[in-house]
Amino acid sequence: MTDPTHRPLHVLVTGGAGFIGSHLSAALLRRGDQVTALDAFAFGYDSRLKEANAARLLEHDRFSLVRGDIRDRALLAKVFGDDPPDAVVHLAARAGVRASLAEPGEYADVNINGTINILEAMRAAGVDRLVFASSSSVYGARTDPPFRESDDVSVPASPYAATKRAGELLCATWSHLYGMKTTCLRFFTVYGPRQRPDMAICKFATALRHGHALTLFGDGRSSRDYTFVDDIVQGIIAAVDRPMAHAIINLGNHAPVELGALVAALGRAVGAEPVIERLPDQPGDVPTTCADITRARVLLDYHPTVSLEDGLARVAAWLGATDR
């Protein structure tokens, strides 16, 4: 339902055909905004999944799609020059902790140089409102939750995490130098329909549906603060609507779940008994994540509402509908 008091915005969503980006774009369109999605349709999984996301969005007359890479400065100059957005949500990135250990240079090129290109394109076009997608991985291999935005984040545990911390620092610098309003949101283990197939919940649920064993790293006691994508989208939109000089804000669920408990809950949602194969812990993985969301509540009126059981049921229903 459209808010009659909302003044429609033009929002550029980088990575707009991806998992979070497609959910965000749809939510912005529902409230009456104009959305331009920039997406390279690349990096690590079947591009047909993104094509399906884009096809749904292209049914809206206020949605436009630009195919291209955030490392392409000439393309960015055109995107910002033709019809400059009011705000940018920068989601495009090489994602994934383990893959970043194998390709650190690629991660740095996309996540750091690409972010600089976005900031410079905004500056050239006079666009000053940015929401940057950071990650809970910046907190490193901590064992003392909950994680607060004021905590020391000087030792990221993977190249991916290091690039996300670098992105936060770049946002702070452009805010300091040029007066940009940059809000950095640290996402905590986002899941939901249309999730990347390499992510744990989607991968495990697919295996369960087909009667395959689940490969788990470690003893099952690692924990994550799983956050449903609709709750993350709520927080992103609030950050778009409430620009700040520079801020770092956790978006999580403040309810960490151990891996063993997650697998059991997934088994119930899918209706299958998990068969588990265990392997040693992987380099770059962290033992736990848990968001202190006090700042998000105060600054963004952020209140996650989707329980793990409800969220997993929605994932299972989506997988059933797509027969994956």
Image: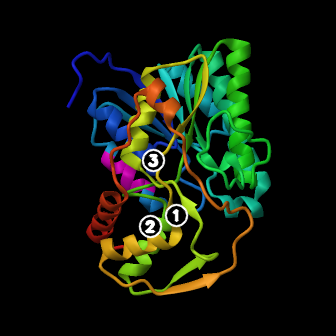
Which residue corresponds to mark 3?
A: 253
Residue designated by label 1: 199
Vertical comparison of 224 with 316: above or below: above
Residue occupying image coordinates x 75% and y 49%: 156
Decide: is 274 above or below 143. Answer: below
Tell me the kind of residue under disc 3.
Answer: Asn
State the SS at label 2.
helix
Element carrying mark 1? loop
Q: Confirm whether residue 17 shows in the render.
A: no
Q: Position of residue 231 (x, y in %)?
A: 39, 43
Region in magenta: 50-56
Mark 2 packing: few (<14 Cα in 10 Å), some, or many (20+)? many
Instruction: State yes or no: discs 1 and 3 in contact (Cβ < 8 Å).
Output: no
Sequence-wise, which precedes: disc 2 or disc 3? Answer: 2
Q: Which label was assigned to residue 202?
A: 2
Residue 3: percent from left, percent from top:
24, 23
Tag 3, which secondary structure? loop
Q: Nearer the viewer, residue 93 or 41?
A: 93
